[in-house]
Image (cartoon, helix red, strand yellow):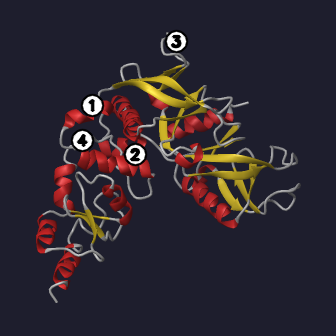
């Protein structure tokens, strides 16, 4: 039947190289398409495209009707052709989101590519590639949790991100060195779809600030500006390192976060519920998920250095606690944790095993030594 012909042709196009993953987020088996851009995309990305009707019109490959001209356009384009056009000049530091990333990152990536054409015209990249950026962000107050407008200045030349409590203030409230800076999107924890967590080290302890901009593009531009500044810092710090080595170091998402119960060093103190964050080899705990700094930090080394994670708690463990225990063995002591559910326990064990099974890098020995000398 004539009606089945376009559908069959589209199914064949989906088998071509490049078309087997979503053009925008790399999700497998896309079954939607933008017939104005000529890309095959997943259901989630099709929802974002639908909000940009001036550049993209979407259809289901399986459910909608297609005419021959549209199918021919898809055949002449496709994901690889579109990539060569719309992604030709992506700066190496720019974060390319994939399907597990938050909605904001995926939406701004799609808008940057097709609506603003940022990776065709490099002058449009100035907001994050100029090496300097200043502007206002809403920053969560440390004491009352209210978001207040604060001026932020990112300067590659000074090697720092600063913020000011008053617009005309001479002295910044905080100076965050680019060397130790990290930024990670945390919409659900912060309770804002644009919520960004920025961390830095002060006196070798981790400090958190939580910010957002009401404009999604501005928020993502700040994120990429921080990555750009880190990229240039690392290029100077590690001359000769390739982009492939440096890019994974620009920003980190946490391996795992959530509530566990913990007991103190004597292990007779009673278990207390705390918010835990596993940031690479740093396990931090907080009274509240949005605290400015951790109550404590534990370094998690590798199995070659006698670090171990065990399911369950020692039989002698006292006090009331959640049912699903985890014991972390370090060269100095044991840490006892308890999870509310078995799936939580298994996810935490997987996260701990991930770092424990990885040999330590030379610079990580220095970090470990510092933790040992902590009071
Ligand atoms: Zn997608």
Q: Is residue 341 left or right of residue 36?
A: right
**Closer mark to the observer between disc 2 and disc 3:** 3
Left or right of 317 in this view: 98? left
Circle 2 is placed at which residue position? 248
Q: Secondary structure at mark 1?
A: helix
Spatial CA span between label 4 and label 1: 10 Å
- Which labelled disc corresponds to residue 86? none
Q: Position of residue 64 (x, y in %)?
A: 27, 74
Q: CA distance from mark 4 to mark 2?
A: 22 Å
Mark seen at residue 171: 3
Is 208 displayed left or right of 182 in the figure? right
Give the residue drawn at x 69%, y 41%.
288
Q: Quadrant of the C terminus?
A: top right
**Residue 213 versus residue 174 in the image, above or below:** below
Residue 299 vs residue 165, the one in the foreground = 165
Could you tell me which secondary element the residue under label 3 belongs to?
Answer: loop
Q: Between disc 4 and disc 1, whose residue precedes?
A: 4
Q: Nearer the viewer, residue 320 or 281?
A: 320
Q: Secondary structure at mark 2?
A: helix
Report the quarter where the N terminus lies.
Answer: bottom left
Per the model, the C-alpha gap separating discs 4 and 3 is 35 Å
Q: Secondary structure at mark 4?
A: loop
Residue furthest toward the bottom? Answer: 1
Q: Position of residue 25 (x, y in %)?
A: 35, 58
Q: Nearer the viewer, mark 4 or mark 2?
A: 4
List the residue tagged with mark 4: 118
- Identify whether 220 is placed above or below 58: above
- Which badge, 4 or 2, is on the more N-terminal residue? 4
Look at 16% across and 67% down and name the residue there: 74
Where does label 1 land, which residue? Answer: 126
Crowd class of label 1 (few under 14; some 14 to 19; many from 20; radius 10 Å): some
């Amino acid at each position: 039947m004539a009606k089945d012909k376009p559908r069959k042709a589209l199914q064949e196009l989906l088998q071509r190289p490049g078309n087997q993953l979503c053009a925008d987020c790399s999700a497998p088996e896309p079954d939607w398409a933008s017939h104005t851009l000529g890309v095959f995309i997943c259901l989630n990305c099709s929802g974002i495209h639908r909000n940009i009707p001036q550049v993209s019109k979407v259809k289901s490959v399986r459910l909608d009707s297609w005419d021959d001209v549209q199918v021919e356009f898809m055949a002449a384009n496709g994901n690889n052709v579109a990539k060569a056009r719309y992604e030709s000049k992506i700066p190496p530091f720019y974060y390319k989101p994939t399907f597990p990333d938050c909605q904001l990152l995926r939406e701004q990536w799609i808008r940057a590519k097709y609506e603003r054409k940022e990776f065709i015209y490099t002058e449009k990249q100035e907001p994050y590639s100029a090496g300097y950026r200043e502007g206002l962000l809403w920053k969560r107050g440390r004491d009352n949790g209210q978001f207040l407008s604060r001026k932020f200045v990112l300067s590659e030349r000074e090697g720092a991100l600063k913020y000011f409590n008053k617009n005309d203030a001479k002295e910044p409230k905080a100076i965050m060195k680019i060397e130790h800076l990290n930024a990670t999107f945390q919409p659900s924890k912060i309770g804002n779809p644009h919520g960004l967590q920025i961390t830095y080290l002060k006196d070798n302890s981790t400090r958190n600030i939580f910010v957002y901009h009401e404009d999604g593009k501005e928020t993502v531009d700040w994120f990429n500006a921080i990555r750009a500044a880190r990229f240039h810092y690392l290029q100077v710090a590690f001359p000769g390192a390739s982009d492939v080595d440096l890019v994974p170091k620009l920003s980190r998402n946490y391996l795992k976060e959530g509530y566990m119960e913990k007991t103190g060093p004597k292990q007779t103190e009673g278990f207390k519920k705390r918010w835990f964050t596993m940031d690479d080899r740093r396990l931090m705990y907080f009274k509240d998920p949005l605290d400015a700094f951790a109550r404590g930090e534990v370094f998690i080394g590798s199995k070659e250095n006698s670090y171990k994670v065990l399911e369950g708690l020692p039989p002698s463990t006292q006090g009331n606690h959640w049912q699903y225990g985890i014991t972390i063995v370090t060269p100095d002591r044991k840490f006892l944790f308890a999870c509310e559910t078995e799936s939580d326990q298994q996810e935490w064990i997987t996260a701990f095993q991930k770092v424990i099974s990885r040999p330590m890098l030379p610079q990580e020995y220095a970090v470990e030594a510092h933790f040992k000398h902590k009071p």
